Image (cartoon, rainbow, N blue to C red):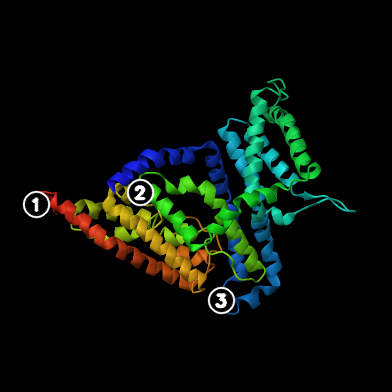
């Protein structure tokens, strides 16, 4: 184990750390986080419209078309909002005027999703403005902002006197870059005939297919927990890559519910954060509950102090307090617990025994309640949340007791209180 950790820290850690701190991936992560309130709002109306209770559907049926409006205005325009958000955050990181860059990114994204009219006016391909356009967003937003910075650095912009209002000054600075970008993407889409959205989807298709399979999600969970085990924020390192896929799954599940169809995706947004990370990444709430009355004073105190935060899925106190990071004794159950819960949850959802993710709830939502809410009110999922805690405790128990005995043997007798 020591040799493996040394190899991982020497070879893998530097590359993944650079990936996690990369400006472009950081902007994507920030842009995705900005969408969370929108998906929560859409999810609330979705629950009201499709709450799984006897007689509820008949009662809300007359109001269902109106209840669907906020769902369409959020999930139906996810890609457009993301184009604006990613453009804004990347421009801010590159020290460009963020609002103008965000507007340009949204404009170009809309441009490539216009369908020329045949005998009528052009129309937007509205199906591509939701989850279907999530991957094209990154190409458009990153390219637009990076090009704007290039033009600004080369001073190929219109600069008005400093005496004019700032809003007017910045709008003219972004004018030439925006015009060139519109011409370039218009030429690619409508003159050359390249469907950028389809091309990008083709590149990401293997990832989209893999992450909804059991081997794919287990590999993802394994990598996240392994990175955390050696001191790298595994969620941050992978989010920019996998979060768009999970968000696309969630939007597809929402569309399926609205159409009265079965939910197509198991590992939609919230699968890992709610069903796998019970009390934090690695389901460390199970370790905390095991060690609340530990005979080792340090473990006991850390467990009791971290319990309030772990109820809200924040586990840094116990993660670094025990510690779990770079501790072979606890790294094993840390990774193993996540894999067991991922496999168990996947199996139950695939078999239809518990509901699949439908609502995007904040990652700080307490376990069991989060299980219930994310599935749109499935009580069986809440029961599975209770069982998941018991499983986590069972996996951690032998390793925790062994670590406890080692600590006690290393202490003088008078400190074992």
Image x and y of residue 223, in percent: 43, 51
Image x and y of residue 267, in percent: 52, 61
Q: In which quarter of the view is residue 339 placed? A: bottom left
How far is mark 1 from mark 3, CA to CA? 59 Å
- For disc 3, the neighbor class at 10 Å (few under 14, some 14 to 19, many from 20) is few
Residue in front for this viewpoint, 409 or 85: 409
Please tell me whether residue 317 is drawn above or below residue 177 in the rendered image: below
Residue labelled with disc 1 = 413
Image x and y of residue 241, in percent: 53, 48
Sequence-earlier tag: 1 or 3? 3
Tag 1 near tag 2, CB within 8 Å? no
Residue labelled with disc 3 = 53
Camera sees residue 198 = yes
117 displayed left or right of 372: right
How far is mark 1 from mark 2, CA to CA? 31 Å
Q: Nearer the viewer, mark 2 or mark 3?
A: 2
| Image quadrant where one finds the C terminus | bottom left
Residue in front for this viewpoint, 197 or 148: 197
Sequence-earlier tag: 2 or 3? 3
Query: Which structural element holds mark 3?
Result: loop
Q: Residue at x 14, y 49 (%)?
A: 410
How far is mark 2 from mark 3, CA to CA? 42 Å
- For disc 1, the neighbor class at 10 Å (few under 14, some 14 to 19, many from 20) is few
In the rendering, which numbered label is found on residue 99?
none
Q: Going by the picture, which residue comes out furthest to the right?
A: 119
Residue labelled with disc 2 = 229
């Amino acid at each position: 184990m020591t040799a493996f950790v040394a190899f991982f820290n020497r070879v893998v850690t530097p590359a993944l750390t650079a990936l996690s701190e990369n400006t472009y991936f950081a902007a994507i992560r920030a842009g995705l986080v900005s969408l969370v309130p929108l998906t929560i709002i859409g999810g609330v109306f979705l629950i009201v419209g499709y709450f799984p209770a006897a007689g509820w559907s008949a009662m809300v049926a007359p109001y269902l078309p109106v209840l669907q409006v906020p769902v369409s205005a959020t999930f139906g325009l996810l890609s457009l909002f993301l184009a604006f958000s990613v453009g804004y955050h990347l421009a801010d990181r590159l020290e460009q005027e963020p609002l103008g860059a965000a507007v340009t990114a949204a404009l170009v994204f809309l441009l490539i999703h216009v369908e020329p009219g045949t005998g009528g006016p052009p129309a937007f391909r509205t199906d591509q403005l939701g989850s279907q356009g999530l991957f094209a967003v990154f190409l458009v937003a990153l390219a637009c902002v990076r090009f704007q910075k290039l033009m600004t650095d080369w001073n190929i912009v219109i600069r008005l006197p400093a005496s004019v209002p700032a809003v007017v000054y910045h709008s003219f600075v972004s004018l030439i870059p925006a015009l060139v970008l519109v011409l370039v993407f218009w030429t690619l889409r409508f003159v050359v005939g390249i469907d950028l959205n389809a091309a990008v989807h083709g590149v990401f298709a293997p990832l989209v297919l893999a992450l909804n399979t059991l081997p794919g999600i287990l590999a993802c969970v394994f990598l996240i927990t392994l990175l955390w085990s050696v001191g790298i924020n595994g969620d941050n390192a992978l989010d920019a890559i996998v979060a768009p896929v999970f968000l696309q799954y969630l939007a597809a599940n929402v569309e399926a519910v609205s159409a009265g169809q079965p939910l197509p995706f198991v590992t939609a947004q919230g699968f890992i954060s709610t069903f796998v990370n019970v009390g934090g990444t690695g389901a460390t709430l199970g370790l905390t509950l095991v060690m609340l009355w530990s005979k080792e004073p340090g473990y006991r105190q850390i467990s009791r102090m971290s319990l309030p935060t772990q109820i809200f899925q924040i586990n840094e106190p116990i993660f670094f307090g025990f510690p779990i990071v770079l501790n072979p004794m606890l790294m094993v159950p840390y990774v193993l617990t996540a894999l067991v819960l991922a496999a168990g949850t996947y199996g139950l959802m695939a078999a239809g025994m518990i509901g699949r993710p439908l609502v995007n709830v904040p990652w700080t939502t307490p376990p069991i309640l989060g299980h219930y809410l994310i599935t749109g009110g499935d009580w069986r999922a809440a029961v599975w949340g209770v069982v998941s805690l018991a499983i986590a405790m069972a996996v951690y128990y032998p390793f925790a007791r062994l670590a406890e005995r080692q600590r006690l043997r290393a202490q003088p007798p008078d400190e074992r209180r």
